[in-house]
Amino acid sequence: MNRFIEKITLSKLAGSYLKLLNHLERQILLILDYFGLQPMQQDVKLALLQILEEHHGKHATLITPQLPLSAWHEYINEPTIADAIMDRLTAKANRIELKGDSLRRKK
């Protein structure tokens, strides 16, 4: 997510935002790792919604959140956008919840 947020911000400044959206729309698998680790600005929330809208029903999206699903609305902190994002993510979702200690701690 950190790189995703940076790319959105930089592409808007550089005038290549539409190019980035087109690139992401063509990806067979969109992976959003560490979702919820840092706050999202309004423009990033809207970009995420737009990307998920264009990706929805065409390709796969994988999210590895740092928050429980019940906290996503509060994290997005914008009820309408949160509902729309959650709708696109959960409509045909397969959810896998991992439990237990981190494997990194065992090494």
Image: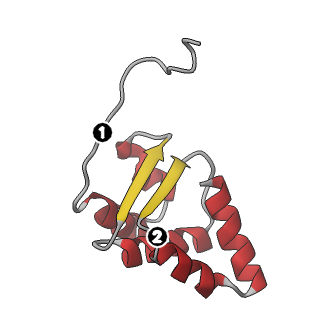
Quadrant that contains the N terminus: bottom right
Horizontal side of residue 100 vs 106, given as left or right: left
- What residue is disc 2 on? 27
Q: Position of residue 90 (x, y in %)?
A: 27, 58
Disc 1 crowd rating (10 Å Cα; few below 14, some 14-19, many 20+) is few
- What residue is disc 1 on? 96
Nearer to us in this view, 104 or 86: 104
The secondary structure type at the circle numbered 1 is loop
Q: Is residue 61 above or below residue 48?
A: above
In space, the residues marked 2 and 1 are separated at their CA atoms by 22 Å
> What amino acid type is highlighted by mark number 1?
Ile
Horizontal side of residue 50 vs 93, given as left or right: right
Q: In this view, does 39 lie above or below 83?
A: above
Disc 2 crowd rating (10 Å Cα; few below 14, some 14-19, many 20+) is some
Q: Which of marks 2 and 1 is in front?
A: 2
Question: Which image quadrant for residue 82?
Answer: bottom left
Q: Is residue 30 above or below residue 18?
A: above
Quadrant that contains the C terminus: top right
Q: Position of residue 66 (x, y in %)?
A: 50, 40
Q: Residue at x 41, y 70 (%)?
A: 52
Q: Residue at x 60, y 60 (%)?
A: 40
Horizontal side of residue 29 vs 20, given as left or right: left
> What amino acid type is highlighted by mark number 2?
Gln
Q: How many marks on residues? A: 2
Q: Position of residue 4 (x, y in %)?
A: 62, 62
The secondary structure type at the circle numbered 2 is loop
Q: Which residue is drawn at 30% across and 39% down?
A: 96
Question: Which image quadrant for residue 28?
Answer: bottom left
Nearer to us in this view, 23 or 97: 23
